[in-house]
Amino acid sequence: MTETALTTAYVETPVFFDAGDHSLFGILTLPPGGRARSGLIILPGGGALLTVNRNRMSVRICREIAAFGYAGLRMDYHGAGDSTGSIGEFRLDRPFVDDVIAGVRYLQSVGVERVVLAGSCFGGRTALSTAARLDNVDAVIVIATALRDYAFGEVKSLVKARSWSLGRYIREMLRPGRFKGLRHRRTRRAYALYARSKLRVMAAGVPGVRRAVASRPTGTEEISPSFEEPLRALAARGVPVRFLYGTEDGFYTDEYRAAAAGALADVLDEGRGVVELALVPGRLHGLTTVAAQDAVVDDVVRWAAAHPQADDGVDGDGGS
Amino acid sequence: VTVDRAIVTSATSIADDGSVERAEFTGKPGDRVFTYLHRPASTPRGAVLICSPLHGEFTRNYRREVLLARALARHGLAALRFHYRFTGNSDGDGANLTFESMRDDALAGLDRLRAEVPSVPLFLVGTRWGALVAASAAAAGPDVAVVLWEPLLDSSRFFKEAFRRRLVRDVRRDVEAPASGRALETRLEAGEGVDVVAHRIDPALYRSALGRTLEAELGSTPRHVLVVQVTPTGSVRPDLGRLLARWDEADLRVDVEILHGDHMAWLGEDRFEDEAAQTRTHELIDLTARWISERVEGAS
């Protein structure tokens, strides 16, 4: 049985599509006329692996951009949400490109010819890598995304390694509850990560050792090839890439600014008209405040409003 | 799905084991509930409605509920999951969410199951806040058994924990004047929403939920109940223990399962863990599916 359900502002339907052996789940939101030639796929980061994203951000984005003629697809990666499969490994340098290509192909199958890919954190890296593999991407929106490669939880351990004294580490280590944690494999892994991060930060401060550390950078100290290569490919093709950060995001203050002034100066130069940087006050990464979520939703919707799409029965300036 | 020809609001997927999953928006435009029905390959011998927790816990528990529903289908049981109106993929603005609207959605879910899978034993599964909703919906009929994962015994506990999380976050971020729990309560009482770490609690939900307890919501009608508690101590929490004693006196047939591990605190850290390595999740799902299966066999 199928039913018709039109709301005043959008039309929505759940969808399944295949990506390799997996059946992926998504929700397609269309403008009131039920068709669109351009679509936006919004990809979550690792903290909220779900179609709705953190606090329904993806729901809001998809429903609001429908007013500007866009189809919106919010989708679950394989092994997440309502999709099948399981995620064996979750790494920034191994984005789920095949999943998103399957999403793009699905959109094409329903008449959505051009796409914009947007994502936060892991989703941003996935958007970049996927866009470089496709020729029907009009733009990429990369939200609070690392330029370097971190393991899940590594950012927090590095922040602690830089801000906590050795004495604080020892005091934290000796707290009674810590010993109980040793019984759990996951907690043991976390302890090891914190210890490694502190040792590395300390070693980098020792003359002589500093050079050795710098000459053998880890994934947390160099720009990831899985960030740089797709970005360069997109820049060469003139595909617009919009970076959105909070002014207090470490990925912006420590990584993006350094890259823009150094290794990626040629690509991140806004004067070339390909890369665009947008900043909002505060911290976006993790999207752990409603204010951060609102800022992201507003930015993406404003971007869509500035690039309205027209289609049969849908006015370019809205229509609802 | 051909969008050009018809606007459809449902989609169906058939799994390798022959079970069928149907995602669907039900209800009137602007008031639709997102539902997801799992039907086993064989004729269902029982049906289960899954009531999710709220906010950050909704996200953290989501995959567990998906895996539970798939496991239930493998046991020959139908399962219906849904997003409360004003949350998730359902329609509406979060400001309108109330305890009553959640209970109404759960009752609609039970009606849907009775229509889709008539004349089979019915079960409700609820986690944390979802346990309060499941208990409240179950109270509307004596024939429904209930599974409660880490149930909230009192709605005020949910708010207190949320406020404490926010305080911790503010202190960690060196916020100048972190809001105390009392200050946040005052704001809610004055009709103002509050941000509690990535989510917003609105006055309508706060007011509608105040004073609600699991004991009062479930009532004293004899029924089968399974309570699952995840605890690092290996023993039942004292407050839960006292409630279990009272239920025992009231002739509710209550089973308790203890899973050893960290408490599933809502708004906890987001940590990715390989699904295959989540032994506690698999244990939780296995014991729940087994318990429900045994009750179905007992009923037949």
Image (cartoon, coloured by chain):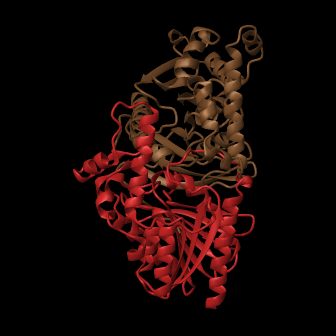
The residue positioned 50% from the left and 59% from the top of the image is: B8
Circle count: 0
Q: Position of residue B64 (x, y in %)?
A: 61, 60
Chain B pictured colour: red
Residue A116 left/right relative to A193 = left
Q: Residue drawn 74% across and 54% down?
A: B276
Indicate the quadrant where residue B67 lies.
bottom right
Q: Nearer the viewer, residue B141 or A199?
A: A199
Q: Quadrant of the rendered structure where residue B31 is? A: bottom left
Residue A221 visible in the displayed image: no
Q: Eyeballing the image, is A313 above or below B71?
A: above
Q: Quadrant of the C terminus of chain B?
A: bottom right
Residue B235 in sight here: yes
Residue located 57% across and 84% down the image? B121
Residue situated in front as seen by the camera: B160 or A254: B160
Residue B52, x across and y down, in percent: 50, 62
Q: Colour of chain A?
A: brown
Q: Nearer the viewer, residue A229 or B127?
A: B127
Name the residue: 51% across, 12% down. A270
When the figure is inspected, residue B202 is found, relative to residue B296, above or below; the finding is above
Residue B94 percent across, percent down from the top left: 36, 52
State which quadrant residue A128 falls in: top right
